[in-house]
Amino acid sequence: MTGYVSFALALLIVGRAFAAGPAPVGVWKTMDDKTGTPKALVRIFERNGELFGKVEASLEGHKGKICDLCKDERKNQPMIGMEIIRHMKKSGDEYIGGDILDPETGKVYRCKFQVEAGGKKLDVRGFLGFSLLGRTQTWIRQD
């Protein structure tokens, strides 16, 4: 009987590991949701149990661009190196509870995202109030 319990417990642990899916930690190529063109590389990283995202590079040649439209502590800061995703927490298969900055407009939106396609894509949704009132971008994982 003990062997069956051990086997069942092992199956449960393995099943949960596979069900969790790949984490979004890593570098992602952001894509403009209107034009489909690549915009930047964003590194998502974990800090104190939450996920954050920082712009690593511009793919549009905006190396020295600053966020002159930002309204918080990021105002007039360089876009490269800027944290644009903050305080995301895992909830089931998605990450929620944080915010995302659009450095082109300076607007901050509530955010949620979910890893798709076996870890190769990240659906990032920024919204005001309700998730229905927003837009989604699909980012591509970089090696």
Image (cartoon, helix red, strand yellow):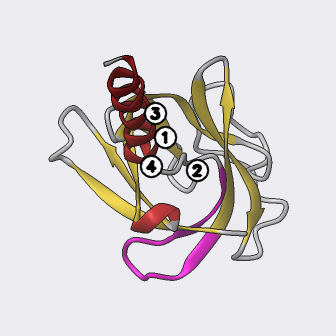
Q: Which residue is mark 1?
A: 100
User: Which residue is painted at 69% across and 76% down in the image?
Assistant: 60
Residue 94 or 132: which is nearer the viewer? 94
**In the picture shown, does residue 47 fall above or below 40?**
above
Amino acid at dot 2: Pro
Q: Which residues are magenta?
A: 26-39
- The tag earlier along the polypeptide, 4 or 3, is 4
Which-is-in-front pick, marks 2 and 4? Answer: 4
Residue 66 or 122: which is nearer the viewer? 122
Can the viewer see residue 33 in this picture? Answer: yes
Which-is-in-front pick, marks 4 and 3? Answer: 4
Which-is-in-front pick, marks 2 and 1? Answer: 1
CA gap between label 4 and label 3 equals: 22 Å
User: Which residue is painted at 62% across and 35% down in the image?
Assistant: 52
As helix, strand or loop, the secondary structure at mark 3 comes to: strand
CA gap between label 2 and label 3 equals: 13 Å
As helix, strand or loop, the secondary structure at mark 1 comes to: strand
Find residue 61 and report its horizontal and vertical position in percent: 77, 75
Q: Which residue is mark 3?
A: 99
User: Do the numbered discs 1 and 3 sit on residues whose CB atoms are within 8 Å?
Assistant: yes
User: Which residue is painted at 52% across and 68% down in the image?
Assistant: 120
Q: Which residue is mark 4?
A: 21
- The tag earlier along the polypeptide, 4 or 1, is 4
